[in-house]
Amino acid sequence: MKIGFISLGCSKNQVDSERVMGLLKANGHTLTKSLDEASAIFVNTCGFINPAKEESINTILDMAEYKQKNLKKLIVIGCLSQRYKEDLIKELPEVDRFIGVSEYNKLDEILSEVLETEIIGSYGKMERLISKKAHTAYLKIAEGCSNRCTYCAIPLIRGPLNSYPKAELLLEAQHLILRGVKELVLIAQDTTRYMEDQGSNQLGQLLKELNALPGLKWIRILYMYPNAVSKALLMDMKACDKVIPYFDIPIQHADNDLLKAMARKGTVEDIRQVIHEIREVFPQAILRTTLIVGFPGEIQKQFQALLDFIQEIKFDRLGAFAYSLEEDTPAYFMKDSCSETEKQERLLQVMDLQAKISEEKIKAMIGSTLDVLIDSKDRGTNTYRGRSIHYAPDQIDGEVVFTSDQALKIGTFAKVNISRNDEYDLYGEHQG
């Protein structure tokens, strides 16, 4: 059977999609990019915030249109299915089956029934089908989250922290490296608490063992809860030559009262101290964060404190969201303090400020030579696109665009002399 697959949401969802696609491929099905040809289409959905939920619903409706062509089965999986399954069944009869994340352990049985053909094998135990760059892969080290931030629905959807056994992760990493992966990106809802659900934090030990695997060039860590970035973890990272100094530490805000209302662990002073320690151990550290503006109770003075903190710290990368109500979370019952228009205005102010900071920081790299992992080549030109250690592969940070007089292979590294920049991207020439 020809199967189309649409994966929405975060990189953690992408890993889930790759596992499902691997299971389907192992059972003789063909994954196709041509949705017109697909007999079945899977949509892996996000149910985290309102814009993501809207994108998921719109995508499902778009895919349902293919039932007028060759499509026989439309299957919706993931977070939206987990969170709103009963409502979706009533509202979207076009969908043949909704499968929540809690049902993945019996995916073979469910898919055998809905696809009307036997599926043999367990989800997560078959070889993943890497869906994007063959030289970069995500390694999901845990599922769920136990932090219980008041605005977040992830624990409701994915459950509490459940770390994957280290032996399984090392085996998966070895398989990925044998398939050509040069950059391994560790992900979880909170990577810094790996194995705390089993009694002790083991992220540092996992990094050391991954670092010892031959053939790997970069190890990058995403989703690091700032309160859990300890000095011991920093020293473990420092001891690993393949672990790059890229710190994705979502802080959410810079006002203590709001952090408390969000049920975030630690204070603004703690965040400042962690960043100081990171930069002390890694003077060239790349810092990325995520913020929420317009959280219930946020007044102008608190928002200004956030702007001041951004200006003080000068993050290399920053993403922000306007707070949206999430039912069944504690924050849902808190009194909103600003209108949607005000939230959007504050969001714009944050992003305008960060754009200036980002451009200033990358402008300082003009004249330098960077190691760049080549992701793609522009057709019919001598222009290549890739990433240095400063850019994660999740299409958020930007890229390095460069020209080369000689043919270069995708998935290899090139030295690039940087000659100019824009707000988020760097441009240069290959050092032949």
Image: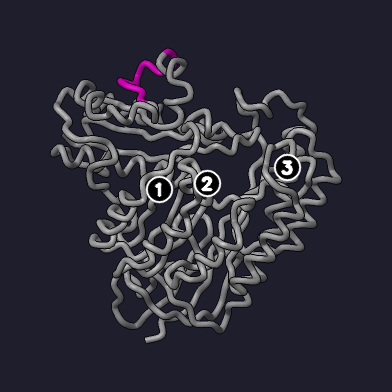
- Examine the rendered structure and indicate whether residue 103 appears above or below residue 240: above
Where is mark 3, residue-wise? 259
On the question of residue 54 being in view, the answer is no
- Total numbered labels: 3
> Which residues are the magenta region?
90-99
SS for callout 3:
helix
- Residue 399 placed where, x, y %? 48, 65
- Nearest to N terminus: mark 3 or mark 1: 1
Q: Is residue 84 above or below residue 233?
A: above
Dividing the picture into quadrants, the one containing residue 123 is top left
* Rendered residue at 59%/73% (across/down): 284
Q: Look at label 2 and name its amino acid.
A: Asp
Residue 293 lies left or right of residue 74; in this view the side is right
Q: Is residue 430 above or below residue 213?
A: below
Mark 3 is on which residue type? Leu
Other-residue count near label 3 (Cα within 10 Å), few / some / many at <14 / 14–19 / ≥20: many
Q: Residue at x 45, y 31 (%)?
A: 79
Dot 2 corresponds to which residue? 190
SS of the residue at dot 1? strand
Under circle 2, the secondary element is loop
- State the separation of the CA atoms marked 3 and 1: 27 Å
Ranked by sequence position, the earlier of labels 1 and 2 is: 1
Residue farthest along the bottom direction in this orientation? 432
Residue for badge 1: 140
Q: Earlier in the sequence, mark 2 or mark 3?
A: 2
